Image (cartoon, rainbow, N blue to C red):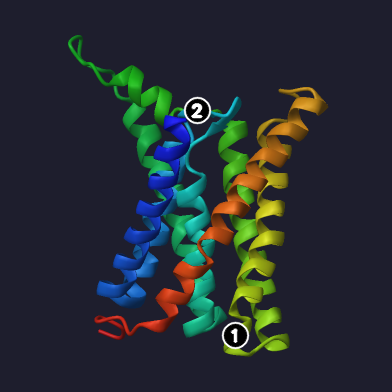
Amino acid sequence: MFNFVWGAAFVIVNFVLFLISYRFFGRKGLYAWVGFATVLANIEVVKTIEVFGIVMTLGNSIYASIYMTTDLLNEKYGAKAAKQAVWFGFFSLIASTVMMQMVLAFVPQEADISQEALKTIFGLAPQIALGSICAYLVSQFLDVRVFSVLKRRYPERGQFWLRINGSTGLSQFIDSLVFCSIAFYGVYSLDVWWQILLTTYVLKFVISVAGTPVLYMARSFKAKAEDD
């Protein structure tokens, strides 16, 4: 029960920090959030928890906020701004991976206490790293594309919820499908593979739906540092 309550609080904190980043730093804050979230999601995913008998990894709430960020950018600044954020997140992911792999290659001093912990967090297997990178690129650009199509077809302000959840629902499923197909190929049986795929997708999508009011709130205010 604690993990469920604490998890709900954790999601709320993610949403509040997302709003603060945009409110005080404008569009730059959204780009910074994407870079921050792509790196942190890959750190959080190392930790597993159990909620009501279901084992899951962390990182889903911060990862879902990346879709929220690109959707908000697409809504207020257009598809070009959203695509730029996707590339920024991709660079952050690649750069942090390269740098931390180089850090791990250093020979630690005898009294060092961090090497093994860093290996656990950043020593991603090539198969998992490839799955993460491919899933991010495919799903994020799909999200931008689908949101743009829905924006043209359903342009009314009151239909913002449809644009958000329509694009996110499809792109997050593709994200989960691509990641699980690459990262867990040959690792689990088909039954276990489907469980991981479905639980991962459902959790991310539920968090994204819960973030719909947050995006309405973000769209409604004028960021202080909008165009500085």
Please tell me whether residue 22 is drawn above or below residue 173 in the rendered image.
below
Residue at the spot of label 1: 158
- Judged from this view, the residue extending furthest toward the left is 111
Residue at the spot of label 2: 48
Where disc 1 sits, the SS reads helix
User: Crowding at label 2, few (<14), some or many (≥20) Cα neighbours within 10 Å?
Assistant: few
Of 152 and 13, nearer the camera is 13
| x 75%, y 26%: residue | 192
- Judged from this view, the residue extending furthest toward the top is 110
Task: Tell me where residue 80 appears, x and y as whole percent.
Answer: 53, 80
| x 54%, y 53%: residue | 207
Task: Tell me where residue 81 appears, x and y as whole percent.
Answer: 48, 78
| x 60%, y 85%: residue | 158
Of 209 and 91, nearer the camera is 209
Cα gap from disc 2 to disc 1, whole angstroms: 38 Å
| x 20%, y 9%: residue | 110
